[in-house]
Amino acid sequence: MSEAQHSGGSGGDIDLSQFYQIFFEEAGENLDLMEQMLLNLNVEAADDEELNAIFRCAHSIKGGAATFGFADVAELTHQMESLLDKLRRHELKPTPPMVDVLLESADALRGLLAIHQGQGGEPPPTASLVSRIRDLAQGGNAGVSAPTPAPVATATVVATDPVVEVQIAPPPAPTQGVSGMPQASAVGAVRKLEVRIGPMDKPEQADAVQDLFRDIPGLGTIQGLTSDRADYKVFAIETTSTDEDLLDLFVFHVAKEQVHIQEAQASSSQAAAAPVAAPEQDLGFGFFPDAPGLPSAKPQPPAVAAAAPAVVAPKAPEHVAQPAAAPKVGAQVNAEASTIRVAISKVDQLINLVGELVITQAMLAQNSSTLDPVQNQQLMSGLADLDRNTRDLQESVMSIRMIPMSVVFSRFPRMLRDLAGKLGKKVELVTMGEATELDKGLVEKITDPLTHLVRNSCDHGIEMPEERIAKGKPPNGTITLSASHQGGSIMIEVRDDGKGMSREKILSKAKERGLDVNDQMSDQEVWQLIFAPGFSTADVVTDVSGRGVGMDVVKRNISSMNGTVEIDSAEGYGMRVSVRLPLTLAIMDGMSVGVGEEVYILPLSSVVESFQVKGDEVNTVGQGAQLVKVRDEYMPVIGLEKVFQVPRFDFDKSSNIMVVVEAEGSRVALLVDELLGQQQVVVKNLESNYRKVPNVSGATILGDGKVALILDTAALVRRSRH
């Protein structure tokens, strides 16, 4: 469709390009929802509501694509819609090949939409998909002629299903369409209509309506008729679509109140007498409430019939939704109005501004600390309110970026289904804690490492079905993805009940590669060997993954997010990979400590306690390591003065305060000079602005304008182990 046609052919009054992005976003959401429902579909006992919901997704995408002139998308979704319509009306029974071809079609649609968005690339081939869908759609109708209703066959199919009961009854009375004309009650029947469009300032506006029938295969036929008025256009249309479906397509080219639809046998005088105005309750004028492509669009009968003749049931079953009443449209608008789409760049800018506000507030608080609170009571009260409001604002803004882990987990069912089918394995995916929220920036970065871990579990963890049965295991392997909050961090685990890792095999491979290993190493130290670059225990390197191949990249990516990764495995029983990440990378609560003239920030979520210590309470053991006894527990001591080589000018002063921090399940005591207080700090990435510094996770700007380093407590804990 040309650009002029895109603009609706209405003299430039409506420019559809402004709605493109909305359509692309909604089409993506519908494809994700369709894929999720297809993966969860039980082909042995498919639920009618699920089939209806899948059909509605395809219908919404097709309607939007047809409106914007994306003929390739409309054609493919039309074929999908035809197959899904037969499934939901029980003319066909769902089969795994049908699910496969629908999933492949969803992938192809993503590629086509990406090209229409200007992202480049080669258009995915769709001819074979269209052919396969047609074959599957026709396979259930062999030998059935179109004009003959088949109530017995329909009743037989439904009667065998204990969940859905459909009673064959006389057709209901015709319902009034939006234009006031009766609508056909039988789904899929060919209808002969006479459509009058007008009055119009420019009669050529209606030409775009004819283009729709040319660009959308299967929509029907249209022929121009003689009109008694110059500002009206009259068309004879044969179609299977309902009045509401047609109005959905026409509304971007001509106003809804300009369209008058009636059955073809009605006289022209009746057509002229058709009401011009839309019903009073249609407050949205049909422009947005029922716009094609809307994810929450109400259930509709199929807009386009299948290429093959369809069996027409005497009555549409109850699970085939009829055009909804007007009050539902209003409710739909209210539901949509409860959310708003905002560009991520705007949210990031807002967070940066709040970060600067936090720094300014800290500066004001520090400068006011020397003032007399009695003489400046009103100022102190205002600063206290500013402190409280700044913290509330920061928490509200940060919550905008928080996204549930279900966004990450939702991509794995499809991936596992395809991978298990390729490997000939049976794998079930269990997800837990999908509602756990994580910062959007971290969600985007954690997806690739998790994908690699899940693929590894499927490829090299889960055994073949016969091998599992021989070991006394169920033939279906299980991969579990879980997410949970632990303190100021989020813990993500990937577990499988496969064969686990072999300690002897890993040590043997490590010795072959010349790594510094010995048989006395603990299990945890042995498992960490697989993070060595290029390390793999796989006997045969597949095109899927190799245990260890790329694991160094996984660890590097997680470390770049200030996260940690741990492995636990039991040979023959499975393995678990635990990834711990901070909740957000932008603003955090910290405890500032002083060492000499330097100030360091400890993440408050890692701080356990602090206490004053005497020199004789610290014991020195082998190789100069120090321990301190805290309530019958000996804890490693780390002197920050030595770690960061802090120059000391006050020689008479010594560090005598211990701050106990916890990370990765272990505790250490940090030796500092003084505790300066607790405050909110804006985390700045040190690596991108300078370079990576050992034992430091980032930096922040203090109230006096100085830069303070934020310590990496996990790295300090690991340092104590060595």
Image (cartoon, rainbow, N blue to C red):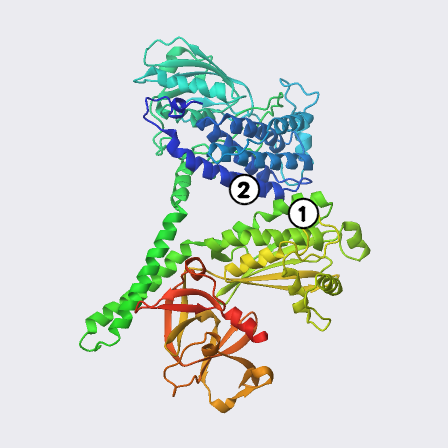
Amino acid beneath label 1 = Val
Location of mark 2 (residue): 33
Q: Nearer the viewer, residue 165 or 575?
A: 575
Q: Is residue 422 above or below residue 702?
A: above
Answer left or right for 124 relative to 230. right
- Viewer-side residue, 239 vs 266: 239
Q: As drawn, is 430 to the left or to the right of 270?
A: right
Can residue 299 be seen at all in this image of the molecule? no
Query: Looking at the image, how many numbered discs can be counted on the residues?
Result: 2
The x and y percentages for residue 442 are: 49, 55
Residue 481, numbered circle: none
Q: Name the residue nearer the viewer: 230 or 78.
A: 78
Specify which label sits upstream in the sequence, 2 or 1. Answer: 2
Kind of residue indicated by mark 2:
Leu
- Residue 721, image quadrant: bottom right
Q: Is residue 196 above or below residue 44?
A: above
Disc on res. 544: 1
> Residue 618 location in percent, x, y?
52, 87
Quadrant containing the C terminus in the rendered view: bottom right
Q: Distance between the residues labelled 2 and 1?
A: 26 Å
Tell me which residue sits at (61%, 52%) in the image. Answer: 452
Disc 2 + disc 1, Cβ < 8 Å: no
Q: In terms of image quadrants, where is residue 650?
A: bottom left
At a point 56% along the width and 28% down the height, the residue shown is 76
| Front residue (pair 632, 503) | 503
Above or below, 331 against 317 in this view is: below
- Identified at 22% across, 77% down, the residue is 373
Quadrant containing the N terminus is: top left
| Mark nearer the viewer, 2 or 1 | 1
Across and down, in percent, residue 163 comes to 64, 41
In the displayed orientation, state which residue is furthest to the left: 375
